Image (cartoon, rainbow, N blue to C red):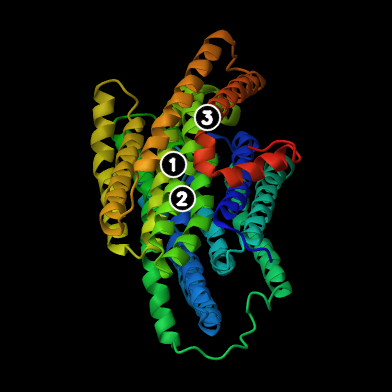
Amino acid sequence: MKRSSFVEGTFIATFAIIFTKILGMLYVIPFYAMVGVQGSALYAYAYNIYVIFLDISSAGLPIAISKIINEYNTLGMMDAKVRAYHIGKRIMVFLATIIFILLMLFAPQIAELLLGDLSGGNTIESVSLAIRCVSFAILIVPFLSVTKGYLQGHNVINVSSFSQVIEQVVRIAIILGGSYLVINILNGTPTIAVCVSVFGAFVSGLVAYIFIKWMMRKNDKELSLKNEYKKDDVTNKEITKKLFSYAIPFIIINIVSSCYNFIDMTLLLRTMSYLKLNTADIEFAASAVTTWAPKINMVITSIAMGMSTSLIPTMVTAYTLKNWKEVNNKFNQALQILIFISLPMTIGIAMLSASVWTIFYGYNVYGSYILALNVFTGLLINIYMTTSSALQGLNKFKTVYLSTITGFVTNAVLDVPLMILYSKIGIPPFLGAVTASITGYSLSIIIALISLKKECKLAYRGTFNVVLKMFVPTLLMMLVVFILYKIIPVNYGSKLSCVLFVAINGIVGAIVYFFVSFKMHIIEKVFGKTMLNKILKKLTFGKISI
């Protein structure tokens, strides 16, 4: 199996994640049309609950496995490395089984907690059924995640990334094929179609797990799966303790991140009901803020996911060897790549939000407002994930707890007051929940960056200067898109018209942004001359280099 460098690993992981997220964006167009607003709200209820419990059962261990495998590899402790993997799998069996049983038994109570007194839309019974159907995925997805963590700990990014593509393709095939079969052939209800769709998470996870295990068996010698090494002076108890010490911060971070959506959805439902909005608008806004706008944001947030996949093992290696210069360089390079790519995408989607929303879900003025603001949450989530990954890689767990929980509490405290305030001053109240999330993530990022600067002596001057330069191509891009927006007509009643409108603006805006960035040497500064030459040679078949 091919091992990847930091930048190569970032590109491989990011490409795979972006590809799967693009598929995840595109499938919602026919799916949303088939199940309607009420069915899409049911999907959002079940999926948000699933993500929270998936995080409880598996969020921390895969990254902890990646971290501990990389650490033992660096130190040459091959026996301990293999035992850590097998201990992680045994822990996963216990956690996944318990979570699955809890979801099956208490689905009605969870549904009642979520819906409260809301009536006229989805029922407690339908939400309970959807939660039970998606809970089967808990039995397989955590094992897939742990196995990916083992590979990523060896800096083998390509196999785990390819398994993500397989998992997403199978899942989407079940979602679309199953929904079409239920609604159009069997004349079933959108509720049953949604239940079939969420069950697809189990089937797709199983297929991806079979693939990744098959690839590991083909390379079992290189990956040391057959433990033929001399026993290291570290006990299983010590390994288990280290696994949990590494996993708990990740679990807290992921659960809190998932709870952002859960809290937002719960408070949105109750506050908008208190403000006397009709049930259809309430369910639309709640699902749009917590599920459907984030679906479009996936292309942006996937950049940080790919970055974290490669950043953590690389920083652990540098940290283990006490190479502080490398730690500083890698973190700042990660931030620069992240902002360079995601900033123009964020602003572009915000400017074209009405057309983008129409392409996916049909024209809705509320939907365009939600997307225009919510997309900035995606940008902040990117920076938050990267700073948190750095803190965890450097064992700064107290700061992880502080920054994450502070941001979450800020979001929860501001949700209701901001929604009521916005309603009183004539702004759609659901935008208050989005503003609360933006405030919470911003606070988490500030705390994390201050801590990294004080405790790890990381310096951001270079990154700050690069980001300042990025505003020149960004402002020029915005100006060009604004002019095109005024010149080119768009018909929101036609998805084809919106697609052409977004494509023209997006292509021209991207050309302007990257051309100006290239001329200002920003791209060379961010990616490095060596990597930039590699990319240019591959794209131009060796004809262009700098």
Disc 1 secondary structure class = helix
Q: Nearer the viewer, mark 3 or mark 1?
A: 3
Q: Amino acid at mark 2?
A: Asn
Identify whether 125 is placed above or below 69. above
- Which quadrant of the figure contains the C terminus? top right
Q: Amino acid at mark 1?
A: Thr
- Which quadrant of the figure contains the N terminus? bottom right
Is the Cβ of the residue at disc 2 closer than 8 Å to that at disc 3?
no
Residue 68, x across and y down, in percent: 47, 72
Q: What residue is disc 2 on?
A: 48
Query: Which label was assigned to residue 418?
Result: none
Identify whether 17 is placed above or below 32. below
Q: Earlier in the sequence, mark 1 or mark 2?
A: 2
Identify whether 222 is placed above or below 440. below
Q: Earlier in the sequence, mark 3 or mark 1?
A: 1
Residue located at (52% from left, 16% from top):
480
Disc 2 secondary structure class = helix
Residue 107, x across and y down, in percent: 45, 59
Which of the pair 486/366 is nearer the observer? 486
Residue located at (46% from left, 62% from top):
59
Is 532 left, or right, of 395 in this rendering? right
Query: For residue 421, what is the image quadrant?
Result: top left
Residue located at (58% from left, 21% from top):
505
Which of the pair 255/502 is nearer the observer? 502
Is the Cβ of the residue at disc 3 closer than 8 Å to that at disc 1?
no
Residue 118, x across and y down, in percent: 37, 41
Disc 3 secondary structure class = helix
Is the Cβ of the residue at disc 1 closer than 8 Å to that at disc 2?
yes
Query: Which label was assigned to residue 517?
Result: 3
Q: What residue is disc 1 on?
A: 290
Q: Amino acid at mark 3?
A: Ser
